[in-house]
Image: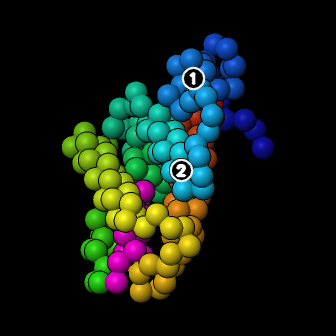
Amino acid sequence: MGYMTDQPARWSQATVHLDMWADPDDDPRNNEGPGPEGELATLYGFLTDYRMTLRMKCEGLEPEQLARRSVPPSTMSLLGLVRHLAEVERDWRNWIVDGDPLPKLYGERDADFDGAVAEQAVVDAAYRDLEREQDATDAALARHTDLSERVGKDSIAVRELMVHRVEEYARHCGHADLLRECVDGRVGQ
């Protein structure tokens, strides 16, 4: 199988370690000093870093680039990932409460990806949705600091929910790595 010549050249903004996204002194995820204390703080630390990584992978791109489906026939795009994670954050709140589920943000299956179109208003709304849903889920979970506590109608452990949140962002940050490289060639963790 031949190498596709219409792909952008690979590059990194980093100058210290060329396989990195940013130089260590410029990377907002680099925290000097001791790591977080305790399991809950550790989980939130990883979640925060993955959330930041997703935003970093999307920075500096135009709406068309964010909405580009870089690996056909997949409907996945960077903008679709932002919308998908907003939808997922909302759904996690449904796991926490006993009441009626919150309605979907974007509609039925795959609407989060299918509706990720190259319009600035859609991009702006996706980031607002993501931030709002992250804040709401964080607030709902803040009332449950015992990781062994079971919540919601399915009696899921808070620990399982937190680990699943980290896993979801980590997996999609891996997708974002590949999608960003396909868009403009930029590489890095």
Kindly tell me whether residue 19 is visible in this rendering.
yes
Residue 146 in the image: state x and y as whole percent.
Answer: 50, 67
Q: Residue furthest left?
A: 121
C-alpha gap between disc 2 and disc 1: 25 Å
Give the colouring mode of the picture. Answer: rainbow
For the point 78% across and 44% down, which residue is it?
Answer: 1
Q: Closer to the camera, 117 or 175?
A: 175
For the point 49% across and 54% down, which residue is it?
Answer: 76
Local SS, label 1:
loop
Q: Please give the residue where the numbered disc 2 appears in the rendered image.
A: 41
Local SS, label 2:
helix
**Badge 2 or badge 1: first in the primary sequence:** 1
- Residue 48, compared with residue 21, is above or below; it is below
Residue 65 in the image: state x and y as whole percent.
Answer: 41, 36
Q: Closer to the camera, 106 or 143?
A: 143
Residue 22's tag is 1
In terms of image quadrants, where is residue 35? Answer: top right
Amino acid type, callout 2: Ala
- Residue 2, compared with residue 12, is above or below; it is below
Residue 178 in the image: state x and y as whole percent.
Answer: 60, 42
122 sits to left or right of 91: left
In terms of image quadrants, where is residue 3? Answer: top right
Q: Which residues are magenta?
A: 85-98
Callout 2 crowding tier (Cα within 10 Å): few <14, some 14–19, many ≥20: few
Q: Residue furthest top?
A: 15
Q: Nearer the viewer, mark 2 or mark 1?
A: 2
